Amino acid sequence: MAFHERIFQKLIIIAFLIAAPAAWWVMKSWLEDFTFRISIGAEIFFVAVITTSFIAIVTVGYQSTKAALANPVKIIEN
């Protein structure tokens, strides 16, 4: 994994650690109002962080590759 991808991974994990408890509490409170009750498991949060990490890796990887392959002369001319 490239340097920038590791930085984004750390930021995603920090954001997850901040947002997950708040999201769990809000969803738990909201779902209690329904007649048919369901519980929120850890699986949904695991899927969310994996999906977010995958999107970040693909996006950063694409942008890094695009920047590395760009011709600097053409960039300066524009």
Image (tube, rainbow, N blue to C red):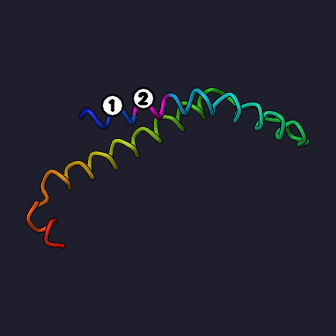
Percent x, y of residue 1 = 25, 32
- Discs 2, 1 touching: Cβ within 8 Å: yes
Q: Residues within 10 Å of mark 2 (few under 14, many from 20)?
A: few
At a point 45% along the width and 33% down the height, the residue shown is 11
Q: Residue at x 39, y 36 (%)?
A: 8
Q: Image check: 19 left or right of 24?
A: left
Query: How far across and down, in percent of the image, does residue 28 sit?
Result: 79, 33
| Tag shown at residue 78 | none
- Residue 77 among magenta residues: no
Chain part drawn in magenta = 9-13
* Quadrant of the image containing the C terminus: bottom left
Local SS, label 2: helix
Q: Residue 10's mark?
A: 2
The residue wearing badge 1 is: 6
| Of residues 46 and 73, the one drawn nearer to the viewer in this rendering | 73
Residue 9, given in percent of the width and then of the height, sits at 40, 32
Q: Residue at x 34, y 49 (%)?
A: 59
> Number of labelled discs?
2
Q: Is residue 55 left or right of residue 71?
A: right
Percent coordinates x, y for residue 77 in the rendering: 13, 72
